[in-house]
Image: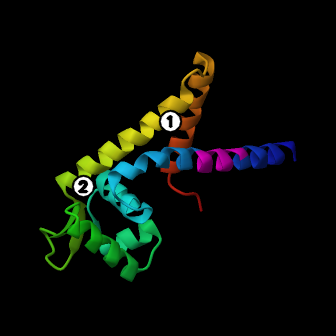
Amino acid sequence: MVLARQLSTTADRLHSASIHLLRRAATADAGMRLDGPRASLLSVLVFAGPQTMGRLAEMERVTPAAITKLVTALERAGLATRVRDGSDRRVVRVEATEEGKELLLRGRAARVRVIERLLVGVSKEDLATLDRAARILDERLRAPRAG
C-alpha cells in the first residue's frame, strides 16, 4: 500500500512538472512559425523518419483527414514532402525536407536553452539526480509496452 501511494504521488508530481516544463519550453517556439500540431508532426518526421500517412495519423492521434491537412500545410511551407516508396510504388511516405529538419532542430535547441536557464543554480548533486531521472524515463518510454 505504501509503494502504491508513493507511485501515485511520484506519478502526479512528474505529470505536473512535465506539463509546466513543456509550457515553459514552448515559449521558445515563436521563432519556428509553426503551431503545435504542425511542430509535433515535423518532430515526428525528423526524429522517427519518413512515415506513411496512416502511421502519422496513429502517432499523432488524429484522423486521416486531419493528418492530410497537416501534411499539406507542411508541404506548402517547404518543410515536408511526399515520396513514393522505392520497393512498392503504391506506398507514399512523408519525410521532412532539409529546411524542415533545420527549422525543427533550431526550435529544439531554443527549447533546450530555455530549460538550461531553468537549471542554472541547481546543485551538482541535484543536476545528477535530474539527469538520472531523465535517463530512467527515457528508457521506460522507449521500452516495448507491456501487455
Label 1's element? helix
The residue identified by callout 2 is 100
The residue identified by callout 1 is 115
Specify whether residue 23 is painted magenta. Answer: no
Specify whether residue 19 is painted magenta. Answer: yes
- Give x and y (percent) for residue 121: 58, 20
- Residue at point 26%, 61% (across, down): 50
Q: Amino acid at mark 1?
A: Ile
Alpha carbon distance from label 2 to label 1? 23 Å
Examine the rendering and report whether any part of residue 131 can be seen. Answer: no
Front-most of 67 and 139? Answer: 67
| Range of residues picked out in magenta | 13-20
Label 2's element? helix
Looking at the rendering, in which quadrant would you find the C terminus? bottom right
The tag earlier along the polypeptide, 2 or 1, is 2
Label 1, residues with CA under 10 Å away: few <14, some 14-19, many ≥20? some
Label 2, residues with CA under 10 Å away: few <14, some 14-19, many ≥20? many
Q: Amino acid at mark 2?
A: Gly
Which SS does the magenta portion mostly show? helix
